[in-house]
Amino acid sequence: MVHLTVDLIAKSRKHFKKKRGLSFPEYLKTLTHLHFSNKNIEDIGDLSMCTNLTVLYLYDNNITYIGNLSFASNLTHLYMQNNSITHIDNLHNLQNLSKLYLGGNRIAVVEGLEQLHQLKELHVENQRLTPGEKLLFDPRTLDSLAESLCVLNINNNNIDDIRDLAVLKELQHFSAADNKLCSIEELEDVFSHWPQLFLMDLSGNPVCKKPKYRDRLITVCTSLEALDGREINDLTREFLINWKASREAKKKKNNKHDVWSTHPLFSNK
């Protein structure tokens, strides 16, 4: 079993380059980045001497549990994708964390992020879920991220409903490709709450085959610059917005006409 410890750092030629007059404990305090991806690591040991750690690379390992990171109050980037993590735990002290990468694990519920008020990016794509299971979101976590989260990647997680995500009003980049989203009306409602959204990928969802799918979303997401990998030019957007306004005006006029035509004073009956 491989543990990430200070002893492992000492044995790493990439990290420990002894400097004249600098002891190993002093050296550990100078570390800001640790690169231990693809090292068969199964757990995180005591790294509390690395008090200035800001970026930690632990992707492509065998970690099942997030632990022993409470010391890392300066951590801004955490890369733990492609491990075997089942729960998002023990991150409450990482209050400067800006980017969190947890794709390719075994997480069923996005939770435990209530204290991460600086989190800008959350990547939880491609969770290895049991058949029939879908990725869920704790409402408390969503509410806590409403003012900060700008990037969310939930690709390929069997998701069929994103109404709970509407609270994430600061989203700028949303990726939910290869899920099971079907309702374009639901998407229109959610996206109307995201005024800053400029990049979105929904490719591979059933909703993409609905009539006017692309046109309808472009008119709702007025800041969108690209949808499903295809750019949206200003001319297209202006045309679709005018088309929608014209259609709604015509519909309103017809409804008003129907109301008057059925009024007793104007009815032929």
Image (tube, rainbow, N blue to C red):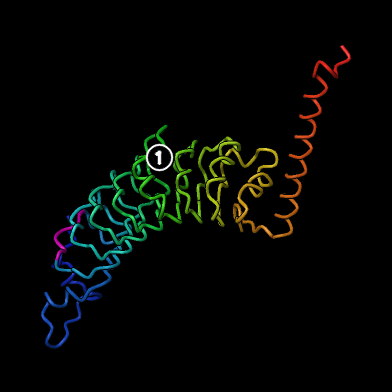
**Residue 182 image position (x, y, % from top left):** 57, 35
Front one among 96 and 42: 96
Furthest residue toward right: 268
Which amino acid lies under the numbered mark 1 shown in the image of this protein? Leu
Closer-to-camera residue (110/220): 220
Residue at the (65%, 50%) spot, across then down:
218
Q: Vertical placement of 132 versus 146: above or below? A: above
Element carrying mark 1: loop
Residue matched to label 1: 135
Residue 141 point in image, percent of width and height: 34, 45
Q: State which region is magenta.
A: 43-48
Closer to us: 269 or 27: 269
| Quarter of the rendering containing residue 18 | bottom left
Horizontal side of 130 relative to 214 (left or right) equals left
Q: Position of residue 145 (x, y in %)?
A: 38, 50
Quarter of the picture holding the C terminus: top right
> What x and y, as percent, mark residue 183?
58, 35
Q: Nearer the viewer, residue 111 or 204?
A: 111
Residue, x 69% and y 46% (percent of image)? 215
Q: Which corner quadrant of the image does residue 188 belong to?
A: top right
Q: Residue at x 35, y 59 (%)?
A: 118
Image-based side of 255 in relation to 178, left or right: right
| Residue 225 against residue 6 in the figure, above or below | above
Above or below, 129 against 102 in this view is above
Asked if the stretch drawn in magenta spans residue 44, the answer is: yes
Label 1 neighbourhood size at 10 Å, few (<14), some (14-19), many (20+)? many
